Amino acid sequence: MILISLILILLAVFGAPLFAVIASSAMVGFLREDTDLMNMALEVLSIADLPFLAAIPLFTFAGYVLSESNAPKRLVRLTGAMLGWMPGGLAIVCLAACAFFTAFTGASGVTIIALGAILYPALAHDGYPEKFNLGLVTSSGSLGLLFAPSLPLILYGVVAEVSIDDLFLAGILPGMVMLVMLSGWCLWVNRANRKPLSSFSFRELGGAMREAIWELPLPVVVLGGIYSGFFAVSEAAAITALYVLIVEVLIMREIRITDLPRIIRASMVLVGGILLILGVSLASTNYMIGAGIPQQLFDVVASLVSSQATFLVLLLVFLLILGAILDIFSAIVLVVPLILPIAAGYDVNPVHLGIVFLAAMQLGYLTPPVGLNLFIASYRFEKPIMHVYSATFPFLIILMLSVILITFWPGLSLWLVADG
Amino acid sequence: MKNLLSRLERLGRIAEDTALVILLCGMIVLAVGQIVLREIFATGFVWADELVKLLVLWLAMVGSIAASRDNRHIRIDALSHVLPDKAIVATRILVDLFAAFVCGVIAWHAFRYQQLEIEFGDTVLINTPAWLAHVIVPVAFTLVSYRFVVLVAWQLYSLASGDDRRPAE
C-alpha cells in the first residue's frame, strides 16, 4: 500500500494530471475494500447532486468576458477617481482594483493579465521603482480571494457543507486586513515619493462613473442580492453571466459574438479541469472516510498536539507547504474533507477554518518555487523568474503576517457572521 | 489518412465548442428564467433545478474533453521548470500513458454502470431515462483517454524526430 502511494505521489510530481492520480488512488482504495469500481462512475455523477455548483461555470464565464472587454480599464479609472487623492495613490488604486476584480472573476488567474497590463506601465510612468511595481502587481493578482463572490469561497462552502453566505460575511474583515496591511507597506516603501495620483475631482469621478455606467449596477445587484439573502449564490451567478453578456456584447459591443465560442471554451476548459478533480476527489474522500482515515489522522495529530494554538501553527505550516505545491481548487476538494474533522476536534469553527485555509492558500500563489502568479507575471512582463521572486518577497512577508493575524484572531472572521 | 485525421480534429473541436455554447447558454437562460418565474409569476418548473445541476455535470464533462484537447488539465508543474526539455517529454509520455489508462478504466466502469441503469429503468427529470442524462460520463472518459493516447503519440513522434512542435494548443 505504501509502495502504491509512493508511486502515485511520484507520478503527480512528474506531472501526471492530478485528476488521474486522485482517481487511481480512489480506485486502488475501492479494490482493497472489495468495492465495485462502478462506484467511481457514481461518485463522478454526484457532481450533479451538489448544491450551488452552477455558480462556478457561470462566474468563471462572466469573469472571462469582463477581462476581455474594456471593463478593467474602466475599473482602474473609477478606482483612481475614488482613491487617487490618497498619498501613494496609484499603489493603493492598484491593490483595490485588483482585489475587486479578482473577487468578481473568481480568482481564475485572469487578474494579473487583465489589470496588470494596464497598471504595470502606469505605475512606472508615475515614477515608482520597477521592482516595487513588479512585486505589487504580482501579489495583487490573488488579492480579493476572501471577498464574495470568489470561486474558492464557494467551492469551500460546497465541499465543507458550510453556509456560503456565512463565508461571504466572514471573508470581509480578513480581506480588508490584507488590503490595509499591504497598503501600509506601499506607503512606507514609497515614503520618499508619496505623491497622490491626482487631486480629488468630482468631474473626474463623474466622468469615470458615466463611463462605467453599465457595469456599476453589477456589484450592487450581486453583492446586495447575496448579502440580503434575496438570491442564492448560483442565482446571482446566472444573473451576472446574463448581464455581462448583454452589456459587453450587445450594448458596449466590445466583444464580438463570433468571439464568444472561443471565450466560452477557454473558461469551460478551466471549469472542466476543476470539476473533474472535484468529481474524482469525491470518490477518494468517500473511500478515505469509509476507511476511517480522518480519524486515524486525528489520533496521530492529537498525540502530538494538545492545544488549539499549537494545532493552528501546525495547520498553517502545512497549508503554506500545500499551497506551494497544489493549486487552490485541487487543495480545497482534496484536503478540506480530511482536515475538517481534525479541526473540529480542536474546536476550530469551520467558517474560520475556511478563511484560514483560503488565506494561506493565497500565499501559495506567491511562494517560490512553484507559485502560479510568479510564473504568470514572469511570462507576462518578460522578467526572469528569479527577479520576480525577489520583487515579490517583501509583499509575501506582509501577507504572511496578515495570514498569521487572521489565523490566531478568529473573531476577525466570525464577528460579522450572525450566529458564529 | 493524415487528411482524414486532421479533418477529425477540426470536427471534434467544432463539436466541443458547439456543445459548450449550447450547454452554457442553456444554463444561463434556465437559471435566470427560473428566477423571473419565481419573482414575477410566483411559479416555476419543478424539474428546472435538477436540469441545471445536470447541465453542470455535462459542462464539467465536455469541459474536461476540451481541456484534454488543449492539454490544459491541472498538473503539478514544478519539475517542468527545472528538467531539460527531453527529460520533460520522456516523463510526460509516461504520465500521460498512465492518465490514458486510468480514464480507460473509469470509462469502462461508467459504461457498466450505464447498463445497470438501463436494466433497472432508473429515471431523472420526472421520466427521462437516467442513462440518457448520464451517458456523457462514459463518453467523456473514453474521449479523454483517447486524447491522452494522441498526446503520447505526438510526444513520441517529437522525441523521435527531434521536432518539438507541440500539438496544436
Image (cartoon, helix red, strand yellow):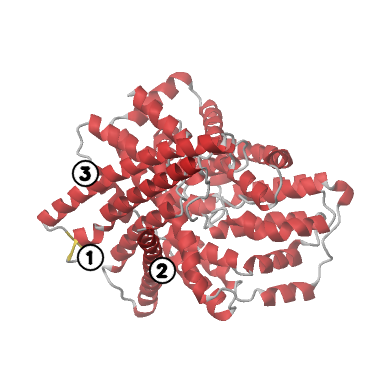
Residues at discs 1 and 2 both on one chain: yes
Mark 3 and mark 1 residues within 8 Å of each other at the beta carbon: no
Residues at discs 3 and 1 both on one chain: no
Residue toward you, A237 or A228: A237
Amino acid under disc 3: Met
Residue toward you, B164 or A210: B164
Displayed quadrant of residue A289: top left
Amino acid under disc 2: Val
Letter of the chain that mark 3 sits on in the rendering: A
Letter of the chain that mark 2 sits on in the rendering: B
> Residue at horizontal 57%, vertical 53%?
A109
Q: In this view, does A154 lie above or below A224?
A: above
- Residue B36 has which mark? none
> Residue at horizontal 43%, vertical 31%?
A9
Displayed quadrant of residue A37: top left
- Residue B21 has which mark? 2
For this orientation, the residue located farthest to the left is: B119
Q: Is residue A81 above or below residue A145?
A: below
Residue A218: give x, y in percent of width and height: 56, 69
Residues at discs 2 and 3 both on one chain: no
Query: Would you name the residue on which mark 1 appears?
Result: B125
Query: Would you name the residue on which mark 3 appears?
Result: A38
